[in-house]
Image: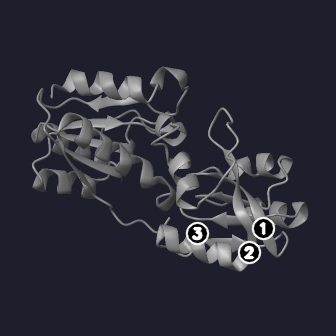
Amino acid sequence: MLRHELQDYLNGYLKVEEFKDYAPNGLQVEGGDDIQTIVTGVTACQALIDEAIKLKADAILVHHGYFWKSEPEVITGFKQKRIKSLLKHDINLFGYHLPLDAHGELGNNALLGKLWGLQDITPIPGLVRLGRLAEPVAIEDFKNSVSKSLDREVLHLPGGKERVQTIAWCSGGAQGYIDQAIEWKADVYISGEVSEQTTHLAKECGLHYFAAGHHATERLGIKALGEHLAEKFDLQCHFVDIANPV
């Protein structure tokens, strides 16, 4: 598959033109023209690049790429090393951030809803979602279920009732959306990260909050996207999960 064909397909499939993002979506570092082997992962760290080199990948596809608005513009230090590694081995780097969180089928939030068996998911524009468990369950049982599903112990900030059913969630660094969860009167709000004030908001506003891990809540989308490409275009796609406790 040619690089520009893959880029055109991904940009259209993920509807990148609909998003005002914090980093460019699409091709971020140009490598070779022909793509047959792709490595997918959450973040384009050096460890992921090194694995891609070992696998002789033609492209890396990630959720967290480069050139964020808040980062220095100069290419020095670790940033220089990463980009030098990509260019030396002729590896393309594609990054898709908010479009991959929001996608209705392969997005992080859509797949988290399926993972937790949520129903009646409100068709809300944007990133944050609201759904319901089939039956109310004890909060401790639901916490254990979420922890098991993500293979990590979630941080639980208690503040609500003992049995829960309505769940609001948003992957990654989305602790600020707790205000939306409060407005919806959700029993539980789940995101990846947590802030100091979240403890007080959960307790004072009567809901439980789970910090389930930025990395852990954003593995599903990029893995599923690689599997989709492998099936549709007969590409070799390898998901590489670089461990991250955050």
Is residue 198 found left or right of 125 in the rendered image?
A: right
Residue designated by label 3: 146
Q: Residue at x 85, y 47 (%)?
A: 183
46 in relation to 88, above or below: below
Residue designated by label 1: 164
Q: Are marks 1 and 2 in contact (CB under 8 Å)?
A: yes
Gap between marks 3 and 2 measured at Cα:
11 Å
Label 2 sits on what residue type?
Answer: Ile
Quadrant containing the N terminus in the rendered view = top left
Mark number displayed over residue 144: none
For marks 1 and 2, the one nearer the N-term is 2
For marks 3 and 1, the one nearer the N-term is 3
Across and down, in percent, residue 224 comes to 37, 48
Residue designated by label 2: 139
- Which of 99 and 114 lies nearest the eye of the viewer? 114
Label 3 sits on what residue type?
Answer: Val
Is residue 223 found left or right of 178 in the rendered image?
A: left
